[in-house]
Amino acid sequence: MTNVLVVAEHDGRTVSSATARTVRCAAAIPNAEIAVVAFAANGAALADQIATLEGVRRVLLVDNALHAHPLAALMAPQLAEIATGCSHVLAPATTFGKDLLPQVAALLGTVQVSDIMAIETATRFRRPIYAGNAVATVEVAALPLVGTVRIASFQPAAAGASHAPVEHVTPTASLPTHTRFVSQTVAAGDRPDLQSARRVVSGGRGLGSAENFKRIDELAALLGAAVGASRAAVDSGFAPNELQVGQTGKIIAPELYIAVGISGAIQHLTGIKDARTIVAINKDAEAPIFEVADIGLVGDLFAILPELNERLAEVLR
């Protein structure tokens, strides 16, 4: 068997869907024996959520008050210790995984493969390069390896009736004292999380102003969708950074993605290429977004949006 260790991402109460997607990736490794490790404070409920994921054989819970606010500098030496004997250490390619795993790779003295989008063998993987314009096949000479998983490329592992055993683990690794948690600011809102939402409505520079950008909120509310933005809209000050979708923002794979006033720069398309259905609204019939859109509406978004909202409201009434 191949011992694969997945690092769970969570908010202290709920396990992120990124973890279930990483487990699905791990299951594609031949003969994988999957264990998931969670660093938490009072994490019993989290461990129970992880234990039901299909393919998980063991849950390792590092329960310590230090992990009430997970810090990569504190988790990395403990994870490196726990990973002894594992062939693969995987985490989602989110800010969490991108912060943690390079430190773990350095401590283990091994290689890291980033943005894994497909498993070919235990040592050969596919990953996007050149802003998603090409896919590279990379192979490592030897195990173990550390890897971040492009979560948009994998469906979440299903939660089943089985319950993997939960083991409490207490690493003995020395922890650094130069890093501490100070504060965290989270944008408040009643919208679904952009990274895991089934539907997303995004606005671009075509909306013209921050005030006009609010016009997509009604459409998002009708659809129960998250709100996103192109980099151009963020750079223009129409939307906050946390809403940015694309290569330098969030990589997403919703069931429905509606792009309003977005031309479709390659960096943006990289972030949405795994969406199941893409709808584009733009006045420029030659906009690149129409090359990837399943449904395209060419016209004035300021005329289309009110009519679309009205029709949707009638249907959903």
Image (spheres, grey):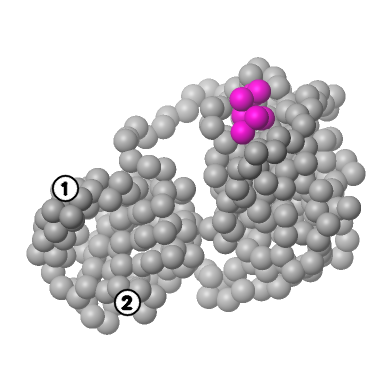
Q: Is residue 159 visible?
A: yes
Instruction: Please tell me whether residue 141 is drawn above or below residue 296 in the rendered image.
Output: above
Q: Is residue 110 visible?
A: no
In x, y percent, where is residue 219?
22, 52
Instruction: Please tell me whether residue 179 is drawn above or below residue 197 in the rendered image.
Output: above
Residue 206 numbered tag = none
How many neighbours does mark 1 have within 10 angstroms: few (below 14), some (14-19), or many (20 or more)?
few
How many neighbours does mark 2 have within 10 angstroms: few (below 14), some (14-19), or many (20 or more)?
many
Q: CA distance from mark 2 to mark 1?
A: 31 Å
Judge from the rendering whether residue 8 lies leftward or rightward of residue 290; answer left or right. right
Give the magenta-colored segment's residue range: 43-49
| In front of the other: 35 or 82 | 35
Q: How many marks?
A: 2
Say which residue label 2 marks: 290
Asked if the magenta segment contains residue 46, the reply would be yes
Q: Main secondary structure of the magenta part?
A: helix
In x, y percent, where is residue 317?
16, 47
Residue 317 numbered tag = 1
Q: The disc labelled 1 sits on which kind of residue? A: Arg
| Residue at the image point whose x is 39% and y is 75% from the top | 292
| Residue at the image point whose x is 19% and y is 59% from the top | 207
In x, y percent, where is residue 156?
58, 51
In x, y percent, where is residue 89?
76, 48
Judge from the rendering whether residue 214 lies leftward or rightward of residue 176; answer left or right. left
- Disc 2 element: helix
Q: The disc labelled 2 sits on which kind of residue? A: Phe
